[in-house]
Amino acid sequence: GNSVTQMEGPVTLSEEAFLTINCTYTATGYPSLFWYVQYPGEGLQLLLKATKADDKGSNKGFEATYRKETTSFHLEKGSVQVSDSAVYFCALKGSARQLTFGSGTQLTVLP
Amino acid sequence: GAGVSQSPRYKVAKRGQDVALRCDPISGHVSLFWYQQALGQGPEFLTYFQNEAQLDKSGLPSDRFFAERPEGSVSTLKIQRTQQEDSAVYLCASSLGAGTRIRTDTQYFGPGTRLTVL
């Protein structure tokens, strides 16, 4: 079946540091890949997505590239801000209709 | 425009009580999903509706869990005889399409209902 493995947290960075959160997946066929973010006290929000190999999703300075050869979809941001503190979830959608999520990575950015 | 809304936001139940959780999807969205999110974990799929038809209920953990969407809009997740292991956040999501678009469509999530069973 489908599965998503995410870098374990928590991750603590200083403001303006570079961020990488690793995500690898197992799926049959050609899944779509997603990053969702959950800010404190709020619901899950889509951050970015990529629907085919080599696609790059980007939003709010975050980027992730769909790498089929390494089955990865790592999230990166060049300079994090305090406001980026949240829980980040990698997810995939394959032939099934539902999303399969990783366990989440808690990011804390210190001023 | 209005997003997905859920009510109540918080629910405390005594073990053995029945609970009903409501989801109002984005207007016009065909697909509706329920997920369960345990503390410190990612959401896990419970069930899926396309309009009023429940096409997949493979994630429901027991026959105490029941979901419906009778008019293809609002959905209710009901849990009978609640147990402590049912304590979690229950998330509802909706997406516009169905069929071949389902793989790429974005799912929009509600804020969730936090259920605590004492």
Image (spheres, helix red, strand yellow):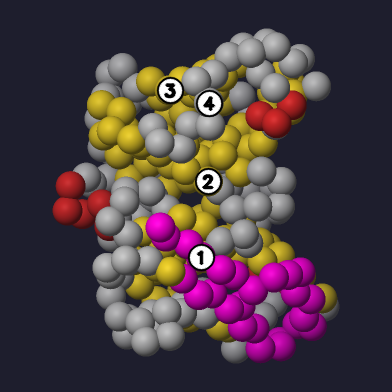
Q: Is residue B84 left or right of residue B64?
A: right
The quadrant of the rendering that contains the N terminus of chain B is top left
* Cα separation between marks 3 and 4: 12 Å
Mark 2 and mark 4 lie on one chain; the one further toward the N terminus is 2
- The residue that appears at 46% across and 77% down in the rendered structure is A73
Question: CA separation, marks 3 and 2?
Answer: 15 Å
Highlighted range, magenta: A1-25
Contact (Cβ within 8 Å) of mark 3 with mark 4: no
Give residue A100's position: percent from left, percent from top. 46, 55
The quarter holding residue A78 reads bottom right
Left or right for B101, reference B14: left
Q: Is residue A2 visible?
A: yes
**Up-down: is B3 above or below A54?**
above
Q: Residue B62 carries which label?
A: 4
Q: Could you say which disc has been placed on residue A15 in the image?
A: none
* Label whose residue precedes the other's in the sequence (3 or 4): 4
- Mark 2, chain letter? B
Q: In this view, does A10 lie above or below B94?
A: below
The amino acid pointed to by label 3 is Ala
Q: Which residue is drawn at 56% across and 61% down?
A: A102
Which subunit holds the residue at mark 3? B
Up/down of B34 relative to A16, above or below:
above
Residue identified by numbered label 2 = B44
| Callout 1 amino acid | Val
Mark number, residue A4: 1
Q: Do pointers 2 and 1 mark residues of a single chain?
A: no
Counting from the top left corner in percent of width and height, residue A91 is at: 47, 62
- The residue located at (43%, 42%) in the rendering is B93
Amino acid type at mark 4 = Ser
Residue at position x 69%, y 70% in the image: A8
Quarter of the picture containing the C terminus of chain B is top right
Q: How far apart are marks 2 and 1 (CA)?
A: 12 Å
